[in-house]
């Protein structure tokens, strides 16, 4: 028999072969451990001082403290937030560019035939930030004392009552359309340019009703200039504890909230997404951040990336159905 021959370095090669898969496994973990290596750009699709910008600034500094790098807010307003969304969708998926997404992102996907990005596939969801109810409100001179009374008035005079919104295809418009569709009340839509104009129209009696996010209405409601008929969240809102939900008022299925979230570009490594999710969960559990958000009528709530993705898809489908039933053509 021939003696067994051993090639030089065979044991070393075998050891390397065994270790190589382990090195591959450790690579993403090491990447997440090192990330972030420079300041993070947080893109907001609206101007300074708006609701999305305010929420972003509430989390930016505490998030920077958690991650050990600055989080820099970059406002990129235009096209209902789609300019900022497109910038993030095309950014390097390295965890250093993040998008402050809101429900308008889902509405845009339902409203436009073609966007320069895929509203779902081009993003890696991280977590929700908070949710804010909308309020069904009327002017102080309106005789309706609650939502059922207002809907009864609308049904008794089809097409005579109207509602204001901040524009065709806005979240407020679609929310009011959903109310119309569920209740069967024939209420006419009058679009305005922005929340201040829509609110002023109801205050002045030009328009009968509006469905608007809570924060710009609270002062008017507390002063008695507006009457809150219902909140659109599934549970009562702490800022208006005596106002019933629309569901309590008999409008089953009318559950609408304005929500905010963070998302990276698609392809961002999972360990980076997970690290950001953990940091954000810590930030949103802080009493200080919770109180700040509550002052803007927003309830802090973190989620898993998977839950955010499911919510986004469900929202797009829901608003697309509302748009279709309302006979609103995609733009």
Image (tube, rainbow, N blue to C red):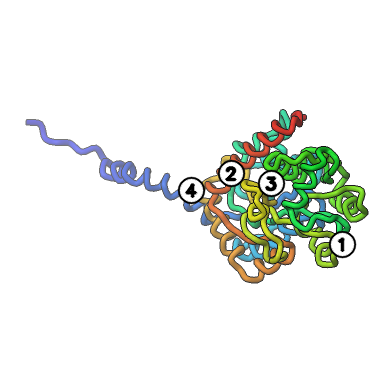
Q: Earlier in the sequence, mark 4 or mark 2?
A: 4
The residue carrying mark 1 is 225
The residue carrying mark 3 is 103
Looking at the image, can residue 98 be seen?
A: no
**Is disc 4 placed on a helix, strand or loop?**
helix
Nearer the viewer's eye, disc 1 or disc 4? 1
The disc placed on residue 28 is 4
Q: Position of residue 228 (x, y in %)?
A: 77, 59
Looking at the image, can residue 222 be seen?
A: yes
**Is disc 2 placed on a helix, strand or loop?**
strand
Rate crowding at label 4 as few (under 14), some (14 to 19) or many (20 or more) other CA atoms within 10 Å: some
What's the distance in space between the residues labelled 2 and 3, CA to CA?
A: 16 Å
Task: Write the residue at 77% across / 42% down.
Answer: 155
- Kindly check if marks 4 and 3 are in contact, taking CB atoms under 8 A apart as contact: no
Count of marks placed on residues = 4
The residue carrying mark 2 is 124
What's the distance in space between the residues labelled 4 and 3, CA to CA?
A: 31 Å
Q: Is residue 287 positioned above or below 101 on the image?
A: below
Q: Is residue 299 positioned above or below 193 on the image?
A: below
Left or right: residue 86 versus residue 30 is right
Q: Earlier in the sequence, mark 4 or mark 3?
A: 4
- For residue 162, what is the image quadrant? top right
Left or right: residue 123 versus residue 83 is left
Nearer-the-camera pick, 292 or 24: 292
């Amino acid at each position: 028999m021939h003696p067994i021959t051993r090639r030089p370095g065979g044991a070393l090669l075998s050891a390397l072969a065994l270790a190589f898969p382990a090195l591959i496994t450790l690579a993403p973990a090491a990447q997440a451990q090192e990330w972030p290596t420079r300041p993070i750009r947080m893109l907001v699709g609206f101007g300074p001082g708006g609701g999305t910008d305010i929420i972003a600034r509430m989390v930016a500094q505490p998030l920077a403290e958690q991650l050990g790098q600055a989080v820099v807010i970059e406002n990129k307003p235009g096209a209902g937030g789609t300019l900022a969304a497109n910038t993030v969708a095309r950014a390097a998926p390295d965890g250093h560019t993040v998008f402050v997404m809101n429900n308008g992102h889902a509405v845009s996907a339902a409203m436009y035939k073609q966007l320069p990005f895929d509203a779902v596939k081009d993003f890696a969801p991280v977590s929700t930030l908070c949710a804010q109810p909308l309020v069904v409100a009327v002017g102080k001179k309106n005789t309706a004392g609650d939502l059922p009374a207002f809907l009864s008035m609308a049904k008794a005079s089809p097409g005579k009552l109207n509602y204001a919104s901040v524009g065709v295809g806005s979240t407020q418009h679609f929310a009011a359309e959903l109310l119309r569709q569920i209740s069967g009340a024939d209420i006419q839509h009058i679009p305005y340019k922005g929340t201040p104009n829509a609110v002023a129209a109801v205050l002045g009696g030009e328009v009968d009703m509006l469905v608007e996010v809570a924060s710009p209405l609270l002062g008017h409601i507390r002063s008695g200039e507006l009457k809150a008929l219902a909140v659109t969240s599934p549970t009562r809102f702490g800022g208006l504890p005596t106002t019933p939900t629309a569901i309590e008022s008999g409008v089953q299925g009318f559950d609408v909230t304005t929500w905010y979230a963070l998302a990276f570009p698609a392809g961002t490594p999972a360990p980076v997404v997970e690290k950001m999710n953990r940091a954000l969960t810590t930030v949103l559990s802080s009493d200080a951040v919770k109180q700040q958000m509550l002052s803007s009528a927003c309830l802090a709530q973190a989620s898993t990336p998977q839950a955010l993705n499911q919510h986004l898809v469900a929202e797009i489908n829901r608003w697309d159905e509302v748009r279709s039933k309302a006979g609103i053509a995609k733009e």
